[in-house]
Image: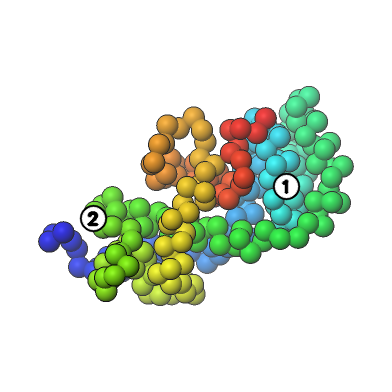
Amino acid sequence: MTNLPDRDALISECAEWLRGQAEIFEGDLSQNTLNSFRFHTAQLWLKENPSMVLHMAESSRSAAQTMLTATGVYLAKGGEITSENRHAISKLLIASERLLSKKGGEDRANRTMLNIAVVLLVEGLRRRHHIKPRRNPASDHLMSGCDIVVEAFDLSGIGVKTTYEAVKRVWDKRKNLLAQIPQQHDIGDDLFGPITRDFNSYIETVATADLSVSAGSVR
């Protein structure tokens, strides 16, 4: 641990990454960008796994609205109609009134992109610099990944404040948050590689975060 980079340098590095993410998504790391990711992914599901559109629509009112909009665009563009997606689209339309009256799920969805950013930052510090994600509860030494990420959020200027306990909670529940990484990947305990493999993989991971079952299991 004697060759660790300077703590302030690590905080600055993580803060710069957060600023970059905010810039990519025009300062919006919450519901609007998540909806865009869900919309994009729904276009693929309607071709390859239309039952997933129904499952996503059940998660919240916002998700239902996004799935209905994505379905409308898919049809308007002349997307291929198969017996499988015809069945899913019909069920979605029949259930639309109920789905659009659902309550709950929005607050959690608003934190999805930030929570994934936390996981990527803490895991990146662990991989690149061998920094332990959590500190010893009895220690005052603030060199854990979670400590560094808290200060990076403060320094980044993206307008998000957090705490060590909040970041630690996200890290401890990372496998629940990211359980939807496509099952064809043999990830074991590695949730990092499949997320960062390519941008489409990242989009699908964000779109399906926090769902109760994986896209690969919904048919």
Q: Is residue 203 above or below residue 157?
A: above
| Amino acid residing under circle 2 | His
Name the secondary structure under disc 2: helix
The crowding category of the residue bearing disc 1, from other C-alpha atoms within 10 Å (few below 14, some 14 to 19, many at least 20), is many
Write the residue at 49% across / 72% down: 160
| Whether residue 191 is situated above or below residue 129 in the rendered picture | above
| The N terminus lies in quadrant | bottom left
Q: Which residue is mark 2?
A: 129
Please name the residue shown 79% across and 37% down the image. 89
Under circle 1, the secondary element is helix
Q: How is the image coloured?
A: rainbow
Which mark sits nearer the N-terminus, 2 or 1?
Answer: 1
Q: Is residue 4 left or right of residue 79?
A: left
Q: Position of residue 181 (x, y in %)?
A: 51, 40
Q: Amino acid at mark 1?
A: Ala
Which of 136 and 127 lies nearest the eye of the viewer?
136
Quadrant (top left/top right/bottom left/bottom right) for the C terminus: top right
Q: Between residues 24 and 11, which one lies in front from this camera angle?
A: 11
Q: Residues within 10 Å of mark 2 (few under 14, many from 20)?
A: some
Marks 2 and 1, how far apart at CA: 40 Å
Q: Where is mark 1, residue-wise?
A: 57
Rendering quarter of residue 79:
top right
Tell me residue 3's x, y (percent): 13, 59
Task: List x then y, in percent, for residue 2.
Answer: 12, 61
Q: Please determine whether, in this image, residue 120 is positioned above or below residue 162.
A: above
- The answer to whether residue 4 is above or below residue 123 is below
Q: Is residue 189 visible?
A: yes
Residue drawn at (70%, 42%), measured in percent from left and top?
Answer: 55
Q: Which mark is residue 89?
A: none
